[in-house]
């Protein structure tokens, strides 16, 4: 009987070895590169398809609050495990090749390093609330915000979200961090990581260990 239960538990453990789920959509990549090579990538790791009409993007400009002319209401459905890429319409051809939406000026994607960009979600009252952000609206940091200890990282850099996060974050100070270890982002040079745009590798859920399965089997048998 113990062996039978143990076998069932092992089968359950391995059948549930899957990628971790996240609390909501979040910005998985951000780039402020040369010329108009600017994009964000939004990842869905919630475990279900998501109606993007429940989300929108907002952008600020020159230390001002969210600018109405940069509001972007999203459409379509984002399948679990997939990303949605938004860029300027004058980005490099390799970016446009994977972009789901390419925007003309003026838009939330026409930011400089000192402009914030945020992801918002509609609540039950139909109001859109901030759920994830790069930068801080109403604040002008100069050339850009520091991220992971890199000065002016939101200008002339690509930011990639670490897969160790649990979901979006409205606290930019916490998200950007002070060094490599406590930041939610990996900072790379301008016009880098384009080959990884259009996909995101989430963290994997740990499988059950043999010892844990044996212990559970023992309890069940008892």
Image (cartoon, rainbow, N blue to C red):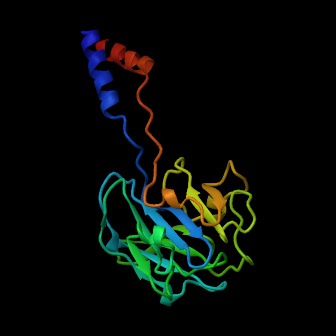
Q: In this view, does 27 lie above or below 212?
A: below
Whether residue 31 is visible here, answered yes or no, is yes
Q: Which of 169 and 198 is in front in this view?
A: 198
Q: In this view, does 162 lie above or below 173?
A: above
Left or right placement of residue 138 versus residue 13 in this view? right
Tell me which corner region of the image, top left, top right, bottom left or bottom right, holds residue 35. Answer: bottom right
For the N terminus, the quadrant is top left
For the C terminus, the quadrant is top left
Left or right placement of residue 9 versus residue 57 in this view? left
- Write the residue at 48% across / 60% down: 197
Q: Which of 29 and 210 is in front in this view?
A: 29
- Write the residue at 50% across / 68% down: 40
Total numbered labels: 0
Whether residue 168 is visible here, answered yes or no, is no
- Write the residue at 39% across / 58% down: 44
- Write the residue at 42% across / 78% down: 102
* Place of residue 140 in the rendered image (x, y in percent of width and height, measured from the top left): 70, 80
* Place of residue 90 in the rendered image (x, y in percent of width and height, measured from the top left): 50, 80
Q: Is residue 96 above or below residue 138?
A: above
* Place of residue 209 in the rendered image (x, y in percent of width and height, measured from the top left): 43, 23
* Place of residue 67 in the rendered image (x, y in percent of width and height, measured from the top left): 54, 87
Tell me which corner region of the image, top left, top right, bottom left or bottom right, holds residue 139. Answer: bottom right
Q: Residue furthest front?
A: 93
């Amino acid at each position: 009987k113990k062996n039978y239960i143990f076998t069932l538990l092992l089968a359950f453990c391995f059948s549930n070895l899957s990628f971790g789920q996240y609390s909501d959509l979040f910005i998985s990549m951000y780039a402020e590169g040369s010329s108009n090579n600017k994009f964000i990538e939004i990842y869905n790791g919630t475990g279900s398809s998501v109606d993007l009409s429940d989300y929108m993007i907002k952008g600020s400009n020159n230390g001002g609050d969210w600018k109405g002319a940069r509001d972007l209401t999203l459409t379509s459905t984002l399948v679990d495990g997939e990303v949605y890429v938004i860029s300027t319409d004058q980005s490099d051809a390799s970016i446009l090749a994977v972009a789901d939406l390419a925007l003309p000026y003026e838009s939330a994607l026409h930011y400089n390093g000192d402009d914030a960009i945020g992801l918002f979600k509609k609540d039950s009252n139909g109001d859109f609330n901030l759920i994830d952000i790069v930068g801080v609206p109403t604040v002008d940091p100069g050339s850009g915000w520091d991220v992971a200890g890199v000065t002016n990282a939101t200008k002339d850099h690509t930011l990639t979200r670490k897969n160790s996060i649990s979901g979006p974050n409205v606290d930019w100070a916490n998200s950007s961090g002070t060094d490599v270890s406590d930041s939610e982002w990996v900072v790379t040079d301008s016009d880098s990581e384009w080959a990884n745009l259009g996909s995101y590798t989430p963290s994997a859920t740990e499988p059950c260990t043999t010892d844990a399965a044996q212990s559970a089997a023992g309890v069940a048998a008892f």
